[in-house]
Image: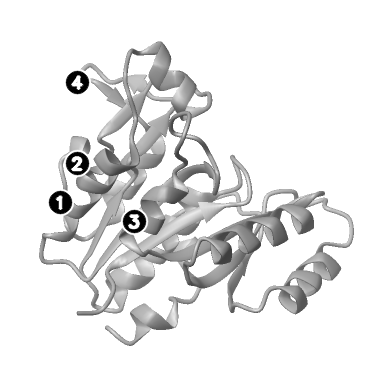
Amino acid sequence: MPNKWLFISGTDTDIGKTAIATGLLWLANNAGLRTAAVKPIAAGCEDSGAGLHNDDALQLQAIASHKLPYQQVNPVALEAAIAPHIAAQEQGKTLSASRLVGYCRGVALLPVDMVLIEGAGGWRVPINNRETLADVARELSCAVIMVVGMRLGCLNHALLTAEAIRRDGLNIAGWVANVVDADMPRLDENIATLQHLIIEPCLGVVPRLTNLTPEQVGGYLSLPVEFESQS
């Protein structure tokens, strides 16, 4: 059976992982794939009256073709917009990779072709004193999409992140240059540098957009070949 898992990681926080994730889901839906989406941990949630909800998770829930209840999309909702393990401690919760893996495996039992998992922050974000969110991706043997937030400092962040993903034994299915700073000096030259130094395919360059819809973002992206072959 083809690998269903696609893990979206970033070079930092606030670099557009959710925008890229929803764009990829839109592409997959239009290619005829049955999709589900999970954000196992979300920090920075607000009380909706029906519990804590996170805007990123709500966007994933809305675009995935297989409609899941919110709690299945985002099983660990944390109120403070801080490092997840600290937010969890403040709410009296204990995070573990095995528990998060269990949530994700439950979704994979559904009749879907792709389970997109959106990470939190960067690749090595801690979930407790021993584990990081990368352990979840490793346990599931996910293909990884690396979202590079194009701004000053991104070259170092991108190369270190790619090195860490490879060292963890996972396949980088591709990377996306997401322009978060439209005024970044020498933007084109920085993108060209990454295209030269990162051996995995660039799946798209997304400009700074004012109207971030999945369809608009998806227009700048390509699906990883692993999932193109399933459509």
Q: Look at the image and tell me in which quarter the N terminus lies.
A: bottom left
Residue furthest to the front:
130
Inter-mark Cα distance, 2 to 3: 19 Å
Q: Give the labeled residue for mark 3.
A: 139
Q: Are marks 4 and 1 in contact (CB under 8 Å)?
A: no
| Residue in view at x 21 percent, y 46 percent | 102
**Marks 3 and 1, the one that precedes in the sequence:** 1
Q: Local crowd at mark 4 within 10 Å, few (<14), some, or many (≥20)?
A: few
Describe the element under mark 1 as helix, strand or loop.
helix
Inter-mark Cα distance, 1 to 2: 9 Å
Let me know if residue 192 appears in the view: yes
Q: Local crowd at mark 3 within 10 Å, few (<14), some, or many (≥20)?
A: few
**Marks 4 and 1, the one that precedes in the sequence:** 4
Q: Give the labeled residue for mark 4.
A: 50
Residue 93: x and y in percent read 31, 19
Q: Look at the image and tell me in which quarter the C terminus lies.
A: bottom left
Residue 199 vertical placement versus 109 (above, below): below
Q: Amino acid at mark 1?
A: Gly
| Residue in view at x 37 percent, y 64 percent | 142
Let me know if residue 220 appears in the view: no
**Marks 1 and 2, the one that precedes in the sequence:** 2
Q: Give the labeled residue for mark 2.
A: 72
Q: Are marks 2 and 3 in contact (CB under 8 Å)?
A: no
**Marks 3 and 4, the one that precedes in the sequence:** 4
Describe the element under mark 4 as helix, strand or loop.
loop
Q: Give the labeled residue for mark 1.
A: 106
Q: Nearer the viewer, mark 3 or mark 1?
A: 3
| Residue in view at x 24 percent, y 50 percent | 104
Describe the element under mark 3 as helix, strand or loop.
helix
